Structures are given as structure tokens and as C-alpha cells.
Image: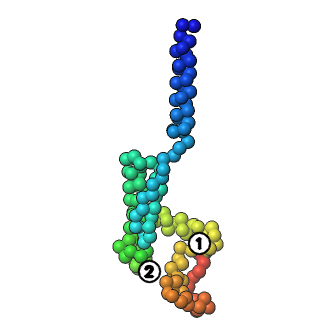
Amino acid sequence: MENCGYHVFMRYLSSALILCVVLFGCGREPAPRIVSKEMLGTVVSIKVYDDGPEADAAVGKAFEAIDNIGSTMNRFDPRSELSRLNSAAGGGWTPVSADLFEIIQDSVRYSGETSGAFDVTVLPIMKLWNFKAAKLVSLNQDCSGFSFRYE
């Protein structure tokens, strides 16, 4: 029993260390920070639970991905790939990126799966009904010539 004091000391030390870990380390997430940027005609916010350089790099990559989506698929930006495709509608084949092709392909599939409830071709009716106007036009307006359903 010559090391009895040592064993008691080690028990107290290990208990104190466990208590410190429980009180100050385990189960506590770092305080979140929100990084916001104006993109896509709105404010995009990302909540981050880390403040290290890896988190900053991940946030940067996320904003780059969102910016790429905007530059490819923003119908309001005449420079976007989607706007250029819409402008070329009816004029023959137009090459598109794999990303845009996949989105269009998925949209057509979702339209079929929902019997037209999801309609990627809704823009003509939105223009007809003028959703941006202060006063909407009547829903009884002549809509002949417009296809509302994916067949």
C-alpha cells in the first residue's frame, strides 16, 4: 500500500478531468455564426457552427455553388444559360450544359409524375396573368393557345 496516496490522487485528478470535460467540452456546440450575402435577388444566409479556416472554406464553396446556379439558371439575368436558352426557343437545337440539361430532364419527369401539377413551362401563363402587376388580371381571361399540362 505504499502508493495508496498516488492512487487516491489519480482518482481525484481523473474525476476532476471528467467533470471538466462534461462541464466545458462535451455536448456543447460552438455558438453559431451567420454568414449572409446578397445573391439570386435575395439574401442568402448560411449558419456555421465552427470558426476555423475549414468552415470558412466550406462557406466560400457553398456561396460559389449558389453563384454558379444563379449564373446558369437565373431566368432574370439575360447572360444566364437558361435565359439564353429561353431566348432561342423555337429556333432549333441549342446546346446546354450537363447541369441545366439534368434540371430540365428532372423537371419534365416531375411534371409527368404530378400529372402537370408541377409545370416547368409555367412562364407563359405567369406572363399572361402578370403576377408582378399591382392588380392581377382576371383568371377568366382567354387562355386559348396555352398548354397547362404536360402530356
- Asked if residue 92 shows in the view, the reply is no
Q: Is residue 91 above or below residue 139?
A: above
Instruction: Give SS at disc 1.
Output: loop
Residue 75 % position (x, y): 43, 74
- Check disc 2 and give the amino acid type: Gly
Gap in Å between the C-alphas at discs 1 and 2?
A: 22 Å
Q: Is residue 68 above or below residue 51?
A: below
Task: Compare residues 91 and 87 and report the one nearer the observer.
Answer: 87
Q: Quadrant of the C terminus?
A: bottom right
Q: Residue at x 55, y 69 (%)?
A: 108
Secondary-structure class at tag 2:
loop
| Residue 97 numbered mark, or none | none
Residue 108 seen in the current view: yes
Q: Which residue is mark 1?
A: 118
In the image, farthest residue toward the top: 2
Residue to which mark 2 is pinned: 90
Say which residue appears at 64% left-offset and 72% top-offset: 115
